[in-house]
Structure formats: structure tokens, C-alpha cells
Amino acid sequence: MLEIRNITKQFGGFVAVNNVSLSIPAGTTHAVIGPNGAGKTTLFNLASGSVTADQGTVSFEGRKIERMAPHDIVKIGMARSFQRVNIFPRQTVFENVQVPLIVGAGAHLNPFRRSAGTHHDRVMELLEMVALADDAHRRAGELAHGRQKQLELAVALASNPKMLLLDEPTAGMSIAETKMSIRLINDIVRKNNLTLLFTEHDMNVVFDIASAVTVLHHGEVIAQGAPHEVRGNEEVRRVYLGKH
Amino acid sequence: MCTPWQTRFLLAFFAVIAALPLLGMPHLMDRGVQILILCLFALSLNVLTGQIGSVSFGHAAFYAIGGYACVILMTRLGAPLWVAMPAAIALGALCALVIGYFCVRLNDIYFAMLTLAFSMLVWAIAHKWKDVTGGGDGFVGAKIPDLLRDRTAMFWFTFAVVGLCTFALRMLSNSTMGRTFIAIRENATRAAFIGVNVRRMRLLAFVIAGAFGAVAGSLMSLYIHGMFPESAFWSESGRVMIVVLLGGMHAFIGPIVGAIVLFLLEVSTAKHFEYWPFVLGLILLAIVMIAPEGLVARLASLRTRGLPRQESGHA
């Protein structure tokens, strides 16, 4: 579904991502791991249109997307979340999820349709999914960090994507929150038949849900394959697991 | 968004204005016309400043374009009002499309500076293109339909146009489009990643604001039977920005409250003090210190006093 081929990105003289290739078949769950500064977020930004590649291509369902604007990439079915929480903090939880539905239906160009109550049922359904229905009318900025991350997941799902890109979905969470969150993500991905690409720094989280793992180190792929293969890889143990 | 209590305020405001002719004092009708035009001008700016979050310092350009176009079309080409006014509004929208095309590429202070530069360009054209605009003396002695030369008729015409436009802008503010504007104001990056073409939406807001600004300008030109280059000067853009900030840009009625307050302050200080701009400045300073987010936000927070204050900000 997503094909990244020989992609390279430099910032100044620093090579953040060097000749990385990645192939993610539909319906799979793919994790990108690596120490801080390995290039995970840059790879994500390249895949979602935030950053343009110096070299290489990205295609989604056969369409080249490496030069597409973020809003067009969303329209063809790829939604993403951010490592640092990125929501509409002064809007209510309800409105945060409502806006992507409005945009998805093309109603953001309609000055006549009342916004209040629009897509009410679908918003509540999505909030149920991430266990935030009771907080629908609170301001998003008031939620605890972990719940803001869940809200972000609901916002991403509201664009009705075929593929989800989650950048460190459990960053800043406690161990208990992380476990709950991973279970939630796993459930949602399976129920909605989504393809998932996510980055993570905690290896244990990865092995629970990923069907394939790519290990990045200094912007390069040092291992790729099924979780148990990657876990057994000597170099991975040396650069990454050795730290634990 | 225009909440129910704001809607009640709007109805009360228009009821009070509608009662002015009954008081039998002709100059009150003049004041009514001036306040109504200032309200519409500020409401149109707030589509940009308050709703989508682009602070324009050149909004007077569209006010001036609307005003000049309306009276020039009627006087020089003999166009009837029902042609001249819509044409003036269309020209305002078209100019906003062209100017906006360049401006929406920039953000924040750069956007503000570019809008300012374009408005000064409009001012320079109005000033120098003597044959058409009348130059520095302004365009005076416009051919106005006889009906609108009557004070009462002009009052009701302005009342109807501003009322209709306020209704339209209220609808926009409560619509799915308005909701998307607010999302862009709150977090443009996130808006792009839920599928919003942010630049195109900003251009759309710019054109809407320009069109309604041109309505306000054309009303003013009908009222004063002409137009002056100063109407495009940066200080006019600044004045309408003060109106918006005074009332509060995040509430629909903010610009109306700001217009009423500034207008009443200008009139009363000018009446009682020789150095009235000085006194006006002091009063505005005090208001801004008491209500930094505008008078409407201050009133709203008084209404909900006792509830915990909600802090905002990006995580």
C-alpha cells in the first residue's frame, strides 16, 4: 500500500534519512524503531508530505505522493498523528473530531450549513472508540496528556483513512497508559481494517502489535523483518537493545 | 460563533438603531448611519482577524475601492444604483482575490505588512489618478439617486443593507465553513493534516472580507456623496482594527460592541475636550488594560465568574 524507495533527506549537511526503502502491504502493521535522532520522525514527515525528499520516491496505492501537499494526501486516504500533541486546544473535544468530518464531506466550503450538531452521531461513535465520549464538551486543552493523544487518534480516524501514520503514539505516557493505548490502537486498526505505520522507542510495545519492524540508526536501515528476526539481529542488539 | 445571547444582543442593537428616527432628532439618524457602516466595516475585517486568524492592516483598501467604484460608476457612467453598488462590491471582491493571492502566501507580521503595502498602493492610486478619482481633494459632488438624498431614506437603506450583511456574516460564522476557519486560526498545521487546503481557505476568507468591506465603503460614499483618498490610508485600517480589538475578535458581536464604544467615545470626547484625541487615547488604554481580549470576552467572563478559568495554549 505504501512504498518508500531510496529516500534521502538532508538538513544542511546533516543526513537525517539516508537511502531508506520501506514497503508496507495493505492490512499490515509496521513499526519503525530506533534511538532518538535515528530519523524516524523525518521518515514520517517525508511519507506524509510535511517535508519534501531530496531523492527517492514515495507512492501510496501506486500514486506518487512525495510532492503532494499534506491536505491532498489526507484526501487519498492517509492520516497521521504527531509526536508532540497537535490538536485544537481551545475547541471542544467534540469540535476537534467534527472538523475533519466536515472537511471530509466537503462542507468546509459551505457557508450556509449550520455547524452545530453536524455529524453528531459519527463524532460520538469515534469518541466512544477512544473512550472520550464523556469528555465531548470539555476543551481539548484541558485533557490530560494521555487523553489528548487518544483524541489525536480520533481526529486522525475522522478523516476516514485507509492508512494511519502514528508518530510515537505513546510518547510521554506512563507504562499503564502505554499498555492501554497500544491495546486501543490495535483494536481500532483491526476493526477498521487499517494499515498502520508507527514509530516507537519502546521495543516491547512494538513486539506486541507489529507484524514487521524496521530499525533505523543514523538515518539508515540496519535491520528489517518480522519482530522475532529483528530481535535476534546482532547489530540491532548492539546499537539499540544493548542500551536496555 | 454567534451564541444565543449574542444573537439577542444583535436583535436588541438593531431594535435600538431602528428606534432612532422616532426620536425626531435628525442628527441621531446621521449617527445611526455612521455607526451602522462602522459596524459592517469591522465585522468584515473580523472574518479575517477573528475567524481565520489573519491580521490584516490594509482592510481600508477594500472600503475605499467599494466607495470610489460606487460613486464613480454612478457619476461618470450614469449607472443606476442597483448596477453601481453590486458592481462596486464585485470589484472589491475581485481586488481582494488579486491582492489576497499574494498576501495569503505569508503569515503573521509578513501578511500584515503586505496587506498594509497594498492598501497604501490603493491610497496612492486614489491620490494620483486625478481624472478619475478627483485626486487629493477627493471625489465630491457625486450623482446620488434622489431618493437617497433624503435623510430618512438613506437611514433605512443603510439599516437594511447592514442588517442583511450582518445576518449573512452571522450565518457564515455559524456554518461549517466558519468552523473550518476557526480550526485554521487555532492550528493551521493540524488543519492541513485533516485535509484543509489552508492557503485556499485563507484566500476565500480574504475575498469574503474584501467584498463586505466594499459594501461598507459604498454605503459611506452614498452617505457623504463622494469618497476621499484618506479612506484607504493606513490610519483607517488601524482604526477599524482598534474597533475589532476593543470589542473582542473572538466573539461575533465583538466588532459591533467595539464600533459602538469607539464611536460614542469619539463623539463625547470631541464634544467636551479640546485635546480630545489625548483623552480618547487614555480611555482606550484603560479599556485595553481592563479587557485585553476585548469587552465581549470580559463581559462573558463576568457572566461565568466562579467557574475555573480555562487556560489555553498549544501543548
Image: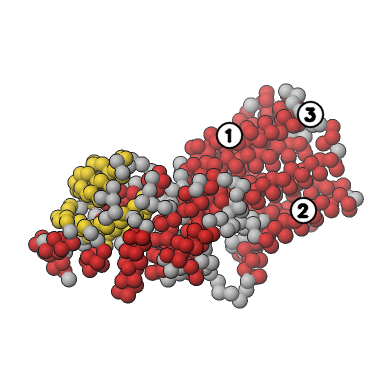
| The N terminus of chain B - image quarter | bottom right
Asked which colour scheme the image uses, the reply is secondary structure
Disc 1 versus disc 2: distance between alpha carbons?
A: 31 Å
Residue B139 is situated, as x and y percent measured from the top left of the image, at 72, 31
| Residue A3 visible within the image | yes
Q: Mark 1 vs mark 3: same chain?
A: yes
Task: Name the residue beneath numbered marker 1.
Answer: B95
Q: Mark 1 vs mark 2: same chain?
A: yes
Write the residue at 42% across / 65% down: A129
Rendered view: A179 above or below B55: below
Res. B14 mark: 2
Chain under numbered label 2: B
Residue B191 is situated, as x and y percent measured from the top left of the image, at 45, 52
Q: Are marks 1 and 2 in contact (CB under 8 Å)?
A: no
Task: Using the rendered view, name the quadrant where residue A155 is placed.
Answer: bottom left
Tell me the mark number nearer the camera, choosing from 3 and 2: 2
Q: Secondary structure at mark 3?
A: loop
Q: Is residue A125 left or right of residue B83?
A: left
Task: Name the residue beneath numbered marker 3.
Answer: B143
Q: Earlier in the sequence, mark 1 or mark 2?
A: 2
Amino acid type at image mark 3: Lys
Tell me the mark number nearer the camera, choosing from 1 and 3: 1
Mark 2, Cα crowd under 10 Å, few <14 / some 14-19 / many 20+, is some
Residue A232 is situated, as x and y percent measured from the top left of the image, at 11, 64
Amino acid type at image mark 1: Cys
- From this viewpoint, which residue is outermost toward the left? A234
